[in-house]
Image: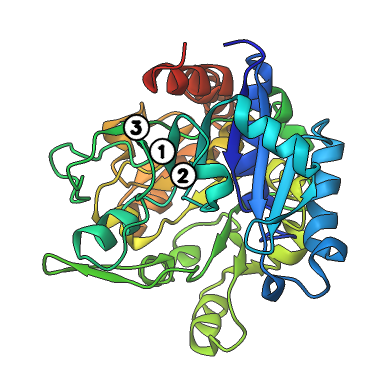
Amino acid sequence: MSGETVLLGASVAQRPGSGGHTWVFLQYLLGLQRLGLEPVLVDWLEPEMCRDHVERSWNIAYLADVMDRFGLGDRWAVLHGGGRAVVGMSDGALDRAVDRAALLLNVNGFVQQERVLERVPLRVYLDIDPGFGQMWRALDLHDPFAGHDAFVTIGERIGQPGCTIPTNGLDWVTTPQPVVLDQWPVQASGGLGAYPGFTSVASWRGPFAPIEYEGVTYGLRVHEFRRFADLPARTPERLEVALDIHEAETGDLELLRLNGWHLADPAVEAADPWTYRDYVQRSKGELMIAKGMYVASRSGWVSDRSICYLASGRPVVAQDTGISELYPVGEGLLTFDDPDQAAAALEDVSSDYARHSRAARALAEERFDSSVVVGRLLGELGIP
């Protein structure tokens, strides 16, 4: 398959200034490139998403800068005007890329334009928010998977005992998210800078609402975070989160601050891929509190952000979403279910930081290396 084109359905231009979100797509683009393929990012915009005309917008400027600085300068197209107009590639170049593409990896089904979907031989839905789409379809609320031929999810326990995410009768391929290791080099512990504590980058609510399915309400990160509000009092470690939370959430903001959480601004610490990477790598490690959906469904979801911490040699203390049934935990990656377990895991990491740091990188190399993960995924999809 060397040299063939793979389209990646993305939403980078839709979310300029979100460095962590951008990295989700960069890991695939760069990972595909390292396998000798020709990745092309396809995004789309509507006028209401932009502060200025689409072609002059910050959205386009942000995407163009990212792609250029990562050596992907001519491998992107943004559709607008109902898919009739293109920014980035010319119309003709996009049509040629679509016609020679082996497949479309359509992350969360972001690309719906017929100009792409109807002409690609293999349309793959790549689900990075496991549980939401599957439950919407099962409840006849919305079918995000329509128009696709194959279905991939990072909810790696779907279909397994104890996982409550419905399969909807679809044949799911499971995969972790990849990390391009040379973009996330190991950071020596002596390099810990302004953020010597455990950090994370997160949204308080995000774009989705809680879902009630078969008598259970599946919530968001806010609902889980409240359970761990007093965690800073249980540990001497500094806990900080670059939290996307609306200023109107005054009650929750006060709850977090009174309990000793340090709040950073993601618009500063994760404004682009480079500041995001710097924030991750200057941290001591990650304390990861997940969305209620991922936890309650026992999805097996592993955060793309956590994988970046691991690759950097930064240990991860993560709320268990079923991770412990998929990956070796206890060194480098530690899991918890309640505040006492979280505090104990933080203490364990700090008591032998060098060991946990080495184990974190080793796990990233063994299980999340983009060449292995993306190569295996293509094989599962029948692409040699």
Decide if residue 52 is on the left or right side of residue 295: right
Q: CA distance from mark 2 to mark 3?
A: 23 Å
Nearest the viewer among 109 and 89 is: 89
Q: Answer whether labels 1 and 2 touch (C-beta < 8 Å).
A: yes
Mark 3: few, some, or many residues within 10 Å (few <14, many ≥20)? Answer: some
Image quarter for residue 185? top right
The residue type indicated by label 1 comes to Leu
Label whose residue precedes the other's in the sequence (3 or 1): 3
Q: State the image coordinates of residue 254 (x, y, percent, origin top left).
A: 54, 84
What residue does disc 3 label?
174
Per the rendering, the mark at residue 334 is: 1
Q: Looking at numbered disc 3 in the image, what kind of residue is underneath it?
A: Thr
Q: Is residue 175 visible?
A: yes
Among the two numbered marks 2 and 3 on one chain, the one whose residue lies closer to the N terminus = 3
Relative to 144, residue 351 above or below: above
The label nearer to you, 3 versus 1, is 3
Q: Quadrant of the N terminus?
A: top right
Disc 1 to disc 2, C-alpha distance: 5 Å
Name the element at disc 3: strand
Q: Please give left or right for residue 155 compared with residue 4 in the image.
A: left
Q: Secondary structure at mark 1?
A: strand
